[in-house]
């Protein structure tokens, strides 16, 4: 694909994402992080296209009617009104959602369906590991444990409570199970609601629980996945689910709540349980930990799915076509 004729694009991004499709047209544009509300005409001079990536402050950017615009919605909260979304659609050349699930949520609010372009995963970074023992030693994870990884923000939508309630059921059946929970939170009120579960598990099943709360660099995340025998994803809402694609790219089988984007992103490369059902979750964890062949099959399917459906090159090609349609 020849990107030499791609028009300069002004990207508004909250953070640098490794492999983000905007990197194909760098020319000094990506990595310059601005709040959309602070955009000025001088800031957009020399650019042929605005690619907007956040809802906050988007109204200011929509005023630049002389500039073609693409808006990628990374989720729609309950506080976003239909009028707000209609304004975005009427002032953008294209609106993009990262999943069919999110696209349907947007359509249900304003009656207009966005384009769907799945996010990618950096396949040069997230790869299967052949050194699980070494990785576990580096992380301080016991070598002989069956490791169940949970990776996410500790918020109500991630539903860590269901996992915590499943731990006693799993540990009683599989004593060498270790739940490796990597998470941080700014929601202290929610953390307080989890205290009863934390106290009970630490008292009775402390040997089956390991918590990582410190920040892990993006480039070190593959080590986290490399230490796991299974990833459990309890979230009840995702606009896409980067954890899904990172895990399957690393060859880690995934067990997820059957809701939101999980079935769409994982397909037949994942296993599922009913949302918020800790007993069914425990049953599935036990079954998967005891069935090495099934985990190996899911790992193979996951690697293949990540490479075929979730490369950033695929996403870049689709955005490239929208850029061309918007400008030429």
Image (cartoon, rainbow, N blue to C red):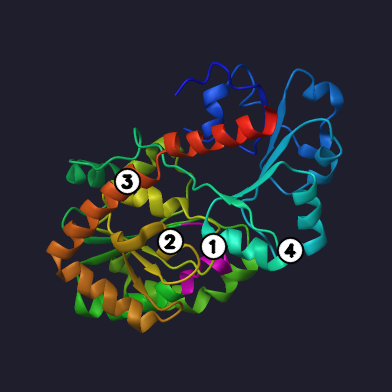
Sequence-earlier tag: 3 or 1: 1
- Along the line of sight, the residue nearer the viewer: 205 or 66: 66
- Along the line of sight, the residue nearer the viewer: 14 or 12: 12
Q: Secondary structure at mark 2?
A: helix
Residues at circles 1 and 2 in contact by the CB criterion of under 8 Å: yes
Q: Which residues are magenta?
A: 152-161
In the rendered image, residue 46, in percent from the top left (x then y), is placed at: 75, 17
Residue 84 position by quadrant = bottom right
Label 4 CA crowd tier, 10 Å (few <14, some 14–19, many 20+): some
On screen, residue 140 versus residue 201, left or right, reads left
- Visible residue check, residue 205: yes
The residue that disc 4 covers is 110
Sequence-earlier tag: 2 or 3: 3
Q: Per the image, is 157 magenta? A: yes
Q: Secondary structure at mark 4?
A: helix
Residues at circles 2 and 3 in contact by the CB criterion of under 8 Å: no
The residue that disc 1 covers is 101
In the rendered image, residue 286, in percent from the top left (x then y), is placed at: 23, 74
Mark 3 or 1: in front is 1
Label 2 CA crowd tier, 10 Å (few <14, some 14–19, many 20+): some
Sequence-earlier tag: 2 or 4: 4
The dot on residue 264 is 2
């Amino acid at each position: 694909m020849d990107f030499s004729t791609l028009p300069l694009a002004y990207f508004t991004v909250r953070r640098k994402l490794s492999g983000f499709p905007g990197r194909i047209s760098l020319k000094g544009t990506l990595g310059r992080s601005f709040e959309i509300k602070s955009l000025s005409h001088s800031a957009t001079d020399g650019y042929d296209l605005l690619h907007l990536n956040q809802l906050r402050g988007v109204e200011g950017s929509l005023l630049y009617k002389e500039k073609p615009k693409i808006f990628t919605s990374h989720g729609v909260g309950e506080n976003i009104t239909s009028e707000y979304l209609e304004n975005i659609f009427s002032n953008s050349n294209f609106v993009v959602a990262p999943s069919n699930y999110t696209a349907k949520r947007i359509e249900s609010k304003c009656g207009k369906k966005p384009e769907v372009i799945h996010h990618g995963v950096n396949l040069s970074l997230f790869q299967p590991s052949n050194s699980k023992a070494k990785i576990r030693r580096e992380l301080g994870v016991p070598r002989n444990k069956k490791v169940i990884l949970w990776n996410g923000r500790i918020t109500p939508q991630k539903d860590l409570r269901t996992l915590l309630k499943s731990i006693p059921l799993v540990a009683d059946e599989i004593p060498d199970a270790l739940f490796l929970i990597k998470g941080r939170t700014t929601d202290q009120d929610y953390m307080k609601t989890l205290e009863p579960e934390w106290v009970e598990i630490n008292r009775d099943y402390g040997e089956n629980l390991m918590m990582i709360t410190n920040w892990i660099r993006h480039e070190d995340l593959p080590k986290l996945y490399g230490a796991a025998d299974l990833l459990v994803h309890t979230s009840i809402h995702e606009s896409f689910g980067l954890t899904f694609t990172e895990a399957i790219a690393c060859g880690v089988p995934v067990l997820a709540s059957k809701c939101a984007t999980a079935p769409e992103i994982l397909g037949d490369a994942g296993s599922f349980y009913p949302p918020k059902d800790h007993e069914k979750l425990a049953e599935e964890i036990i079954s998967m930990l005891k069935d090495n062949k099934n985990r190996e099959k899911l790992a193979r399917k996951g690697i293949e799915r990540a490479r075929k459906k979730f490369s950033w090159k695929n996403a870049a090609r689709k955005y490239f076509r929208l850029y061309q349609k918007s400008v030429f």
